[in-house]
Image: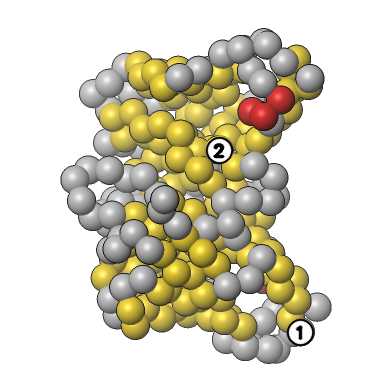
Amino acid sequence: SQQGEEDPQALSIQEGENATMNCSYKTSINNLQWYRQNSGRGLVHLILIRSNEREKHSGRLRVTLDTSKKSSSLLITASRAADTASYFCATDAGGYQKVTFGIGTKLQVIP
Amino acid sequence: DVKVTQSSRYLVKRTGEKVFLECVQDMDHENMFWYRQDPGLGLRLIYFSYDVKMKEKGDIPEGYSVSREKKERFSLILESASTNQTSMYLCASSSHTGSSYEQYFGPGTRLTVT
């Protein structure tokens, strides 16, 4: 069962612009993560935000979490061609550190 | 550098064959996971294991089984491959330690069943 849904499903921007991706989920969570996947490869963890946090930064990444709206956003500032990838949100899904992934946003950064 | 490896990047099998996908992690992680990824469906959990010889069904276990005889190795078995099991298979691992849910992924195996 998919917990998270990313929006938009695809996004195309020029290099240097900011990219914003959104994730909505259905049930209460303890934490939410964002992952990146380059074409045909495995996923790489980007950032985790806990339910008691509202905003978190890591380099050019900014993540917000609004538990009242059950939504999160990932902002990539000053995008680069190397940021071209699919981005997934993942919410905790019970014990053993299980998570549930969304369908993903495909980001294309045009040089 | 942490590492999760998968036995093959690409695999082509025939309908009805028994298929083994192997995953090895070198981080001494307790948890290991198998996902399949299909366009428009994202990642779906097939099985996971939280300890040696322990396994739990995920969201789509039908047609699959798993084996975890050693902590570092988690195998996914397709008992009788079918064309609807053509997919990208991703293995991941994570640690019980603390409250980190970060999963480390292998590069994936693209399986084609003809």
Residue at image location 69% in from the left, 45% down from the top = A39
Q: Chain of mark 1?
A: B
Instruction: Give residue A52's position: percent from left, percent from top.
Output: 23, 23
- Vertical placement of residue A72 versus B25, above or below: above
Relative to residue A99, is residue A40 drawn left or right? right
- Vertical placement of residue A30 versus A18, above or below: below
Q: Secondary structure at mark 2?
A: strand
Contact, mark 2 vs mark 1 (Cβ under 8 Å) = no
The residue that mark 1 highlights is B14
Residue at image location 67% in from the left, 21% down from the top = A80
Which of B37 and B62 lies nearest the eye of the viewer?
Answer: B37
Q: Is residue B46 visible?
A: no
Q: Which residue is farthest front? A: B1
Residue at image location 31% in from the left, 73% down from the top = B71
Q: Amino acid at mark 2?
A: Arg
- Residue count near mark 1 (Cα–Cα under 10 Å), binned few <14, some 14–19, many ≥20: some
Total of numbered circles in the picture?
A: 2
Q: Amino acid at mark 1?
A: Arg
Instruction: Give residue A111's position: percent from left, percent from top.
Output: 79, 20
Indicate the quadrant where residue B92 lies.
bottom left
Tell me the tag on residue A36.
2
Q: Secondary structure at mark 1?
A: loop
Which of A98 and A15 lies nearest the eye of the viewer?
Answer: A15
